[in-house]
Amino acid sequence: MESLLSVDLVKQIRQVFEKLENPVQLYLFVSSDQEDACAPTRQLLEELLPLSDKLSMQVYDVEEDAELARHYQVEGKAPAIVIAARDGEQVIDYGIRYLGVPAGHEFGTLIQDLILVASRDSGLSPQLRTYIKSLTEPLHLEVFVTHT
């Protein structure tokens, strides 16, 4: 199988991943019904994993592991990537999800999210943090990206 990442890109990512401060846990939810999208997503993540000892991944079937998919709010969605922090055996879910193949511009965002989760700091300004703490109801935020 041909690599999705070029030698030069692997070198760049490895350098960036040297800055990963803490472990990151990836959960990939796949489905045999969506194999055309799931296979390259899995391959991409499997090519990233060896670039840092801070990264680990578990793969689940969205249908067979429906309860876990519901827990992570990715039921019926594949491929779906959950990016969480890992602290020993404890997993801290920040609610970061990728639905579909993280290709093109989304690949850069995926790398940035891995760095962000590893740092355990959102990068939000103090003012925005104060505003968020003042919210009295849950806030559900989704970002959609399409390719033409």
Image (spheres, rainbow, N blue to C red):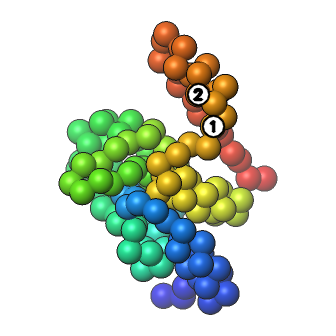
Residue 28 rendering spot, x and y as whole percentages: 38, 57
- Mark seen at residue 129: 2
Residue designated by label 1: 124
Residue drawn where x is 44% and y is 52% of the image: 83
> Are the residues at dot 1 and dot 2 in contact (C-beta closer than 8 Å)?
yes
- Callout 2 crowding tier (Cα within 10 Å): few <14, some 14–19, many ≥20: few
Position in image of residue 133 (x %, y %): 52, 20
- Answer above or below: position of 54 versus 128: below
Determine whether the residue tagged by mark 1 lies in a helix, strand or loop: loop
User: Counting other residues with Cα less than 10 Å from the Cα at mark 1, is it few (<14), some (14-19), or many (20 or more)?
Assistant: few
Q: Secondary structure at mark 2?
A: helix
Residue 77 occupies which quadrant of the picture?
top left
Identify the image quadrant of residue 6.
Answer: bottom right
Give the total number of marks visible in the rendering: 2
User: Which residue type carries mark 1?
Assistant: Leu
- At x 59% / y 82%, what residue is drawn? 10
Residue at (47, 48) in percent of width and height: 120
Q: Nearer the viewer, residue 58 or 1?
A: 58
